[in-house]
Image (cartoon, rainbow, N blue to C red):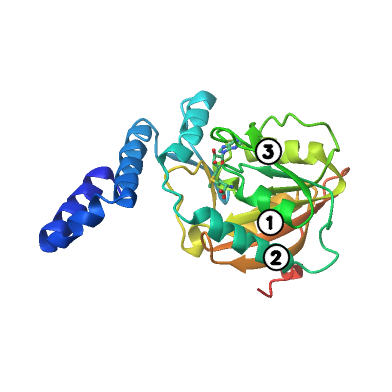
Amino acid sequence: MGLTRFVANQAKATLKNPARIGMVFSPTGVRRLRAMVLNSFQLRNISNTWEQDGNLKNRRYNSYDQYLKHQRAKVETLDLGSYDEKYYAALTDRLKGIDPGTIPTTGSVLCLGARLGTEVRAFIDQGYFALGIDLNPGVNNQYVVTGDFHHLQFADSSVDLAFTNALDHVFDVEMVLAEISRVLKPGGTFIVEAVRGTDEGKEPESFASFWWKSVDDLVDFFSKRSFEATFRGRFAFPWGGHFLCFRLSKGTPKTMVSSDLIDDKR
Ligand SMILES: C[S@@+](CC[C@H](N)C(=O)[O-])C[C@H]1O[C@@H](n2cnc3c(N)ncnc32)[C@H](O)[C@@H]1O
């Protein structure tokens, strides 16, 4: 929703019910308004034109620098409320629900686009050594360091498991997959929490830079790039999406893996 519409809606609702005035000026109301103002300021020069490439599409930016500025701005414009607590609990549950033997139960985890580190803490509390990277990890973040998932600062074959729920924020998916393949150990695991695509009823949000028609399109794309699908589940928080596990087979690219082979019982 644009800022003008948000303010107009708030004014209309408050005229109808003057008792709302306390809520509008509550800390939550003020935080929300501040987020809306920042959001509309940050988005004023960002194009909403997308370039379709088969079943995938990319937002058209004027430059990589503009992409970086757009993505860095996201954390500033959000009122995260109880997100951290809720996402920590939801992801912990999902990790516990993966079929035994599908992913390593110890080792190193790199969380890509980890913002304040919610997923990093979830992995640490399951016994992993975990670290996140983000373009904008905020200040004094113990769990996430500054980094760009197109140019990872880590050594080849050094990570057991990579995780992301920020795939819709990539600029160049080929580059990101190449970087993940590089830093993962042979046979390493890649977990993606992917939001449903256009054909599944979801449209890209204002900070998205990459999108798909369906989650199957992503699975097919990954499978052609040496990521073999090993587990698939559904979830509803923080958005309707699919929990996807892949095993990296370094070497010759694999042919497509049919999504029929994937466990889809959740
Ligand atoms: C949808 S948010 C998810 C945040 C976090 N995973 C969570 O659930 O709390 C996407 C995050 O990706 C980050 N991001 C976007 N582009 C990035 C890039 N090229 N490299 C690293 N992080 C990036 C943004 O800064 C933002 O924090």
Whether pointer 2 and pointer 1 mark residues with C-beta atoms closer than 8 Å, the reply is: yes
Position of 215 relative to 31 (above/below): below
The residue wearing badge 1 is 219
Q: Position of residue 42 (x, y in %)?
A: 38, 33
Quarter of the rendered image showing ligand 1: top right
In the rendered image, residue 38, in percent from the top left (x then y), is placed at 35, 36
Work out whether mark 3 precedes mark 2 in sequence or the reverse, and give the earlier one. 3
Outermost residue to the left? 15
Name which quarter of the figure residue 115 lies in: top right
Residue labelled with disc 3? 176
Disc 2 or disc 1, which is closer to the eye?
2
Relative to the observer, which residue lies in front, 208 or 76? 76
Image position of 19 (left or right of 160): left
Q: Residue at x 60, y 55 (%)?
A: 194
Of helix, strand and loop, which one carries label 1? helix
Q: Mark number for residue 54? A: none
Mark 3 CB near ligand 1 (8 Å cut): yes
Q: Secondary structure at mark 2?
A: strand
- Front-most of 5 and 255? 5
Asked which secondary structure carries label 3, the reply is helix
- What label sits on residue 232 in the rendered view? 2
Name the N-terminal-most of marks 2 and 1: 1
Q: Please state which amino acid type lies under the numbered disc 3.
A: Val
- Gap in angstroms between the C-alphas marked 1 and 3: 15 Å
